[in-house]
Amino acid sequence: MAAANGSSDLSSEMEVDAFRRLFPLRYHEQHLLKSVRPDARKLGSARDTTLALGAVASADGSALAKIGSTTMLAAIKLEVMTPTVECPDEGSIAIEFHMPPICSPLVRPGRPAEAASVISKQLSDTILNSGMIDLKELCLVGGKAAWMAYLDIYCLDADGALFDAALLSAVAAFSHLNIPVVSLNEDGRIVLVSEDKVGLKLEKEPVNTEKRKLKLNSPPFSLTCILHKNYILADPTAEEESIMETVVAVVLDSSYQLVSLYKPGGPVLAHTSVIQDCVALARRRVKELQNVLNEAISDMEVD
Amino acid sequence: MAGKTGSMPATYSPSPATRKKKRISIANGADWVRPDNRSFYQCRPAYLRTSAVSTAAGSAYAEFGNTKVIVSVFGPRESKKAMMYSDTGRLNCNVSYTTFSTSARGQGSDNKELSSMLHKALEGAIVLESFPKTTVDVFALVLESGGSDLPVIISCASLALADAGILLYDLVASVSVSCLGKNLVIDPVSEEESYQDGSLMITCMPSRNEVTQLTVTGEWSTPKIHEAMELCLGACSKLGEVMRSCLKDVVTDSKE
């Protein structure tokens, strides 16, 4: 490859930006040699993470999560369903991840992004299997009525590590969820008890006066890492993800137990030691994310 | 996801949506107050910010009361293969809603009507000759719908276009007015829109004093239309100034 050989002579004269676009891999590898990344991060550290609860007034629970530039808006709407015959005292959760065309130049209207359905499935599996939410808590009237929680997560800005940000926003939205007070009317339908009537004497008793918040059992957090040669890069940006393809996503719960580990192929084959390193990085990250979540919750209580 | 909904149980919202929104008697109108306690000719507090999406060429976020919108602009970039050759640039607009944007959970699909309205409101303000053969994509996502959605989308989109450095003749500002009985209310919220008699929306380029879009629906008398247009144009020029200062702030901030 003449072009690749010639590039070493070129690179000294070329502007940094042009070099970055023409030889992205070489650009990144030169950084990696010095154990630093183009955005001045260390290899194992994640970007700044912020969380705001209650971003959407029209939803029952919502959260906005930002990891670097990657932005996720998650919102939960509660509706009433008839429980299935197999689990008469359990509610249900439906999770969907959306990548609207505003989030990235690669997504066009009318053509849903491939990544969206993959992440959607991953999120459902993680949240439902982690046991974070006891579906029995979503029950209203045994065998008759239960909550169906529709969780929709919108990616507003896609700059890498989408799954991490989506999971964080989902967990935060559940922690912000306020279950409305409802009662059973004559037709056997569940209706909302309006806020100003809660204190008054009602002809119909509310069915859920005490269960206003969901209890979250050891919520899961995740860290996505990129493997490239012998390097492990935590929390990659979209640029890094497009250049180096091997991804490992580690999900741990709050007591650092492994919930899931996802390595969808890729050109780099990971040794067990590398996987262990990823898990160690994820452990550190879970601590950070727990603090971010707790801070967001306490900020909410002050308001 | 059509396949997925088939396996899901049917659900309903516990809020009594079937109840008819009661129309307040506003015939005399003197002691009637708006749902958010604004005066009739007062707009909602607005928050505007550019560069909301890092991966877009330009973007803006607008918040008018509970109406929250993000607009991203991509391009100018290659037109779709199927497109015919064109000497001037093309504008492509798309508006969609989130599933949680309205009080009843929606499908979150593309809104074709608003997309085409947005396209028509903007195309007159863009110097299409400045990007021949290519396309500029303007995508809007309504995060929360709180009334007067289209005017907010249009204003936000023009801010995003300016942020992307697309040549414009002027910024585009848009304001709507609802007619409720004898009264005119500016920048209506969803509740007011649900029982309005008529609605008028003006989209204009404030510093050139040119109107790119004017829609009038419902029951209007000629003097009322005149009054409403004056109201809208006045509000548009104020909104235009707010948008201009939002763009200037970004420049001065980056210089510091």
Image (tube, coloured by chain):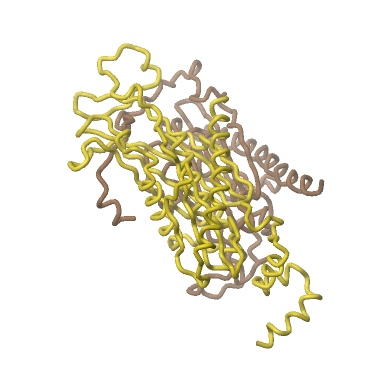
Chain colours: A yellow, B brown
Q: In this orientation, does residue B41 appear?
A: yes
Q: Is residue A141 above or below residue A85?
A: above
Which residue is more in the foreground, A292 or B135? A292
Please tell me which residue is depicted at 45% across the width and 41% down the height of the picture: A219
Q: Quadrant of the C terminus of chain A?
A: top right
Which residue is more in the foreground, A294 or B242? A294
Q: Is residue B165 above or below residue A93?
A: below
- Count numbered badges in the picture: 0
Which residue reaches farthest bottom?
A2
Residue A123: image location, x then y, percent? 42, 51
Q: Quadrant of the N terminus of chain A?
A: bottom right
Residue A43: image location, x then y, percent? 65, 58
Which residue is more in the foreground, B94 or A170? A170
Q: Is residue A206 above or below residue B104?
A: above
Please tell me which residue is depicted at 46% across the width and 45% down the height of the picture: A253
Residue A145: image location, x then y, percent? 24, 33
Q: In this orientation, does residue B219 appear?
A: no
| Image-based side of B255 in relation to A303, left or right | right
| Image-based side of A262 in relation to A282, left or right | left
Which residue reaches farthest front?
A273
Residue B23: image location, x then y, percent? 38, 25
Location of residue B137 (image quadrant): bottom right
Which residue is more in the foreground, A56 or A254? A254
